[in-house]
Image (spheres, rainbow, N blue to C red):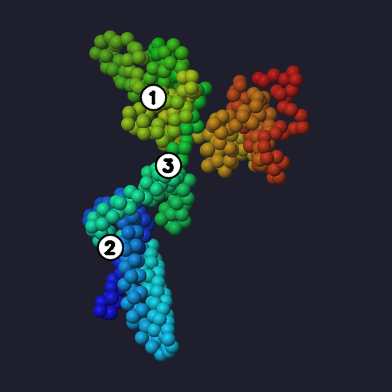
Amino acid sequence: MIVLRILGVVLLVGLNAFFVAAEFALVAMRASRVQQLIEQGDARARVVKELLDDLDRVLSGAQVGVTIASLGLGFVGENALAEILQPLFGWLTGAHSALIAHVVALGLAFGLISFLHVVLGELVPKSLSLQRTEQMALLTARPLKWFLHLFRWVIDLLGGASRRFLRVLGVANPQSHTLVHSPEELQILIQQVRERGLLDAGEEKFIQSAIELGQVQVREIMVARPDVHLLPVEAGLDEVLRVFATTQRSRLPVYQGTPDHIRGFVHIKDMLWILLDRERRAEEGVAAPEFHLSRILRDVLIVPETKPASELLIEMRSRCVPLAMVVDEFGSILGLVTLEDILEQLVGEIHDEFDVIERPLTLADGAMVFDAALNVRDLETQYNITLPEDPAYATIGGFVLAQLGFIPRGGESFEFHNHRFSVVEMDRRRVARVKIQRLKSPESTGAAPASDSAPASARCGGSPE
């Protein structure tokens, strides 16, 4: 009889270890790895996926199993070991010697059972599951599924009771085991993977850019309206060809009435087809039809300035439209975004044979002169000059205007953190070029005029150009 009870102790410790191992293995198992195993044809991985899809219920079942094993271990094991140990204290004498021997044996049995329970039933399986997560998850998944089916009514009863208590505490539909990473956490994970040598620098940068794309608004990457070339819908063939030739663009937006009323865009390939058709007709002596720009217009997207670039990319792909006009809250055109502009946020600058690569001018003192239209994100990633992100601006020129608070003249400057910003060139009321010089010892932590007196355009009698 004692032997059977000892075997029962071993069995219950093993059951406790099984449920602990299954619980920790499933929590630590990556869903992406499970999917990979399923695609490789592993039938056990399908069972693991079923359990992961209902992880809260699975963990409740594992806790039920641990509880049953622990209670059984205490009930069976302590008495069995106490009966084995009690004869060892037969040397005790006195009126209460039998009671003392029983109490001492019971205490030792409790300590021994607790040791077995904690070490073999908890710590060892927990460590194995964390070190060999995949093997343990695949090994324990199917038996655990059988247990969940057998005790489903107990698990559902206890799970329902716990959910009701949580509702009383103000927690509805808890998903405590749902693993969701924020973009910032994902970037940290990617960096850790890179440090382990599983990604190279280029792959890390590409993935980081893809994550950040959802945080980039189209206003930050658009071509600003002053730099957008538009065609009126009434434009003739010669005018359209001339604008294509002078701008070296492949697509041009077309408006009707006012530039804020965009009808679509014209592609240079369509113009080539028209020219070829006219040439063929001329050879055949047939008169060419009258040219109407409106007949060859293609659809263009109209999007708000706050639309995330990632969403615009999806919309462009689904609707097969490579060009979008950006509007403000009043419907006025702010600029233009192409599919290439979005892709450049992922892979860096894309240059074709017609692009003029504009690099900042580096002066003898180390200062650099930038095109004021350069995006502040690009300034940070390409030149390691960080400016605070603000909805009020997206470019260096916008930052300068936001800091000064007025339309500057050429030569105006201010200091921000450890850099001096100087307006090199103005294009009417638009900042065209800005010089940025790193200061050896920063004298200010915010925007301030470089001289003791106010800039000329801010003084009495001064007027902006």
Task: Residue 447: give x, y in percent of width and height.
Answer: 67, 34
Identify which amino acid the numbered label 2 is placed on. Answer: Leu
Kindly give the residue lying farthest to the front in the view shown: 95
The earlier-in-sequence mark between 2 and 3 is 2
Determine which residue is flagged by label 2: 139
Crowd tier of the residue under label 2, counting other residues whose Cα lies within 10 Å: few below 14, some 14–19, many 20 or above: some
At x 27% / y 17%, what residue is drawn? 280
The earlier-in-sequence mark between 1 and 2 is 2
Please, is residue 161 above or below residue 70 in the view? above
Comparing 84 with 151, the one in front is 84
Task: Residue 397: give x, y in percent of width and height.
Answer: 59, 30
Identify which amino acid the numbered label 3 is placed on. Answer: Ala
At x 47% / y 35%, what residue is drawn? 216
Please, is residue 76 above or below residue 66 in the view? below
Please, is residue 308 above or below residue 200 in the view? above
At x 34% / y 78%, what residue is drawn? 81
Identify which amino acid the numbered label 1 is placed on. Answer: Leu
Image quadrant assignment for residue 391: top right
Q: Is mark 2 on a helix, strand or loop?
A: helix
Image quadrant assignment for residue 206: top left
Determine which residue is flagged by label 3: 210
- Quadrant where the N terminus is found in the figure: bottom left
At x 74% / y 28%, what residue is drawn? 454
Q: Is residue 16 visible?
A: no
Task: Residue 259: give x, y in percent of width and height.
Answer: 46, 16
Mark 1 to mark 2 CA distance (whole Å): 53 Å
Please, is residue 328 above or below residue 32 in the view? above
Mark 2 to mark 3 CA distance (whole Å): 36 Å
Q: Pointers 1 and 3 in contact (CB under 8 A)?
A: no
Determine which residue is flagged by label 1: 301
Mark 1 to mark 3 CA distance (whole Å): 22 Å
